[in-house]
Image: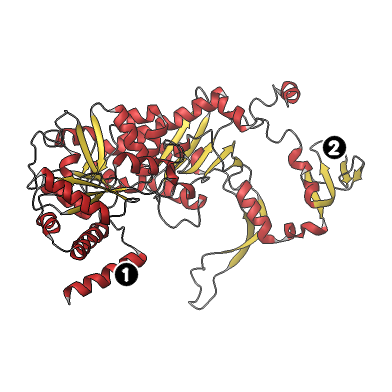
């Protein structure tokens, strides 16, 4: 390849190296047992007829062809007859030649003409056969943004993805000629939380010639979930991908795309915040992923990344800090940001937090554990806690000390009774003096353990083997509740056991942990109690 590039370095300056190796032509022999070429140049020289069966031998003789041009005739091999089917040829043409700069004719099609003015209503409309041109020789990305309207961009999206029925949320037109050449249009589609389904939607072209739909290394990874087209003659295509990532131009292109996306999102946020908030759930996964993986993007996104609350209010990080700093700063002067990952499942915990006037964020993307870890590192004196990680008074510890109605001796006795009945392999029992109107039994899952497991599940950041750790929960018993006193003062072991099991199951029910056989026996026991 180096020898080839040296030899052709002057003649390939504008056209790149695609089409100069002869590999494209040689691939004809993959599907054909014989290839014929009949070609006539613009000079007066006679036409030539070349025939070859793929071996080093070939025949070359004069031909009768009178018009300038070339015919390539493939004698398709018996195992490749699919390439004689119209649908298969059309599929290949559309995939690889959809935007070639030269019109490609594939047979003809029937076009309906307007009826003559004197035609009767029942007269059929006249038709004519026209060349069936399968490609768009001047696609939207080759034009200047000033020459395109919103409908043009949407039309081009439909051209790229005919099976996609949803409109894109917005687009970014890329157009740069220094220090490298690059044009293209990227679209933000509506995204789901499944990171694996999204990739390989951006198509890479070189001078309108399709190259690949795997743009890893050229487009920053967090943007591979977008859709659209990138066209650049400056991307080296004759090298391996590992070398590609080290190439100076590729790094510049990647940085440029990141910057353009950041600028676009920033302007959308500033120009129409209400609309940006409406789109947030559809685009957040890209922005959050970008904040984790690209430091420069984090700095830019920090100004427009939104943090929604369970009440559907949206704050930037600084707005949130300002809103909650008076009420949610603990006794160690740390700002505690409460969040939920599921409004329905963690409803009772959310209500407890709201009763104290705390704001609760709704952070439900699959990479939220990684994101909050990053924010805790970047921001000073800030910690995140899911509402069910601890009893609410422990999540944001204030100076006031809660007094327990039970003596130390009574607490020891209660704990002993509880640990006899509550399964040790799943629950760690702890007693807390809380408000008397708080729930008597609360199940919490330590923030650190749960977060590490989540990070491990979504790749990276977790501790080795963390995802295989058994689920462990805290059973927090409110010593100021009437139920705690009732369990303590119940004389019979059987009744004590029934009270504890029923209370534990109610706490598990509120966390969505009661399933299968245990749920069936809980329902049966509950019916027996109300007979």
Please identify the quadrant where the C terminus is shown.
bottom left
In terms of image quadrants, where is residue 456?
top left
**Depth check: 17 or 212 in front?**
212
Q: How many marks?
A: 2
In terms of image quadrants, where is residue 332?
top left
Residue 29: x %, y % from top left:
81, 47
Residue 465: x %, y % from top left:
46, 41
Badge nearest the viewer, 2 or 1: 1
> In the image, 39: left or right of 531?
right
Residue identified by numbered label 1: 520
Residue 258: x %, y % from top left:
42, 32
> In the image, 39: left or right of 448?
right
Q: Residue at x 56, y 32 (%)?
A: 232
Going from N to C along the chain, the mark reached first, 2 or 1, is: 2
Q: Which mark is residue 419?
A: none
- Give the secondary structure at mark 1: helix
- Give the secondary structure at mark 2: loop
Q: Residue at x 14, y 47 (%)?
A: 411
Mark 2 in CB contact with mark 1 (< 8 angstroms) = no
Residue 473, can we see it?
Answer: yes
Residue identified by numbered label 2: 44
Please identify the quadrant where the N terminus is shown.
top right
Residue 242: x %, y % from top left:
60, 30
Q: Are there few (<14), some (14-19), or many (20+) residues within 10 Å of tag 1?
A: few
> In the image, 272: left or right of 288?
left
In the image, residue 60 above or below residue 421: above
């Amino acid at each position: 390849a180096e020898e080839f590039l040296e030899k052709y370095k002057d003649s390939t300056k504008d056209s790149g190296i695609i089409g100069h190796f002869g590999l494209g032509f040689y691939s004809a022999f993959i599907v054909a047992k014989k290839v014929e070429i009949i070609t006539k140049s613009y000079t007066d020289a006679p036409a030539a007829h070349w025939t070859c069966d793929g071996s080093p031998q070939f025949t070359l003789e004069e031909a009768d062809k009178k018009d300038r041009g070339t015919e390539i005739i493939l004698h398709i091999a018996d195992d490749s007859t699919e390439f004689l089917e119209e649908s298969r040829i059309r599929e290949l043409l559309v995939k690889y030649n959809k935007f070639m700069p030269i019109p490609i004719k594939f047979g003809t099609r029937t076009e309906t003409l307007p009826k003559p003015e004197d035609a009767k209503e029942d007269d059929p409309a006249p038709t004519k056969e026209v060349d069936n041109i399968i490609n768009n020789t001047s696609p939207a990305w080759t034009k200047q943004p000033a020459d395109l309207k919103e409908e043009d961009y949407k039309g081009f999206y439909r051209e790229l993805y005919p099976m996609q029925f949803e409109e894109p949320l917005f687009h970014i037109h890329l157009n740069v000629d220094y220090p490298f050449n690059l044009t293209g249009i990227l679209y933000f589609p509506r995204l789901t939380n499944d990171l694996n389904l999204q990739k390989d939607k951006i198509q890479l072209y070189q001078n309108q010639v399709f190259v690949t739909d795997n743009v890893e290394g050229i487009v920053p990874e967090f943007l591979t979930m977008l859709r659209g087209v990138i066209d650049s003659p400056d991307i080296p295509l004759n090298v391996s991908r590992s070398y590609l990532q080290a190439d100076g131009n590729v790094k510049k292109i990647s940085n440029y795309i990141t910057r353009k996306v950041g600028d676009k999102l920033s302007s959308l946020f500033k120009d129409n915040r209400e609309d940006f908030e409406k789109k947030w759930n559809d685009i957040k996964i890209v922005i959050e992923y970008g904040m984790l993986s690209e430091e420069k993007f984090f700095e830019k996104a920090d100004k427009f990344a939104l943090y929604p609350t369970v009440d559907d209010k949206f704050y930037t990080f600084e707005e949130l800090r300002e809103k909650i700093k008076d009420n949610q700063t603990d006794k160690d002067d740390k700002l505690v940001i409460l969040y939920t990952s599921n409004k329905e499942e963690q409803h009772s915990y959310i209500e407890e937090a709201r009763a104290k006037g705390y704001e609760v964020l709704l952070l439900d993307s699959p990479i939220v554990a990684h994101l909050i870890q990053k924010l805790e590192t970047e921001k000073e004196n800030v910690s995140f806690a899911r509402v069910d990680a601890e009893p609410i008074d422990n999540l944001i510890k204030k100076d006031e000390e809660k007094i327990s109605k039970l003596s130390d001796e009574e607490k020891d006795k209660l704990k002993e009774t509880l640990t006899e009945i509550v399964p040790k392999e799943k629950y760690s029992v702890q007693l807390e003096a809380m408000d008397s109107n708080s729930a008597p039994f609360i199940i919490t899952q330590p923030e650190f353990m749960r977060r590490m497991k989540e990070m491990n599940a979504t790749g990276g950041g977790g501790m080795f083997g963390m995802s295989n750790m058994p689920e462990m929960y805290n059973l927090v018993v409110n010593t100021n509740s009437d139920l705690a006193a009732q369990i303590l003062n119940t004389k019979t072991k059987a009744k004590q056991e029934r009270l504890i099991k029923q209370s534990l199951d109610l706490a598990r029910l509120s966390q969505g942990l009661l399933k299968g056989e245990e749920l069936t026996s809980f329902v049966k026991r509950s019916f027996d109690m109300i007979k």
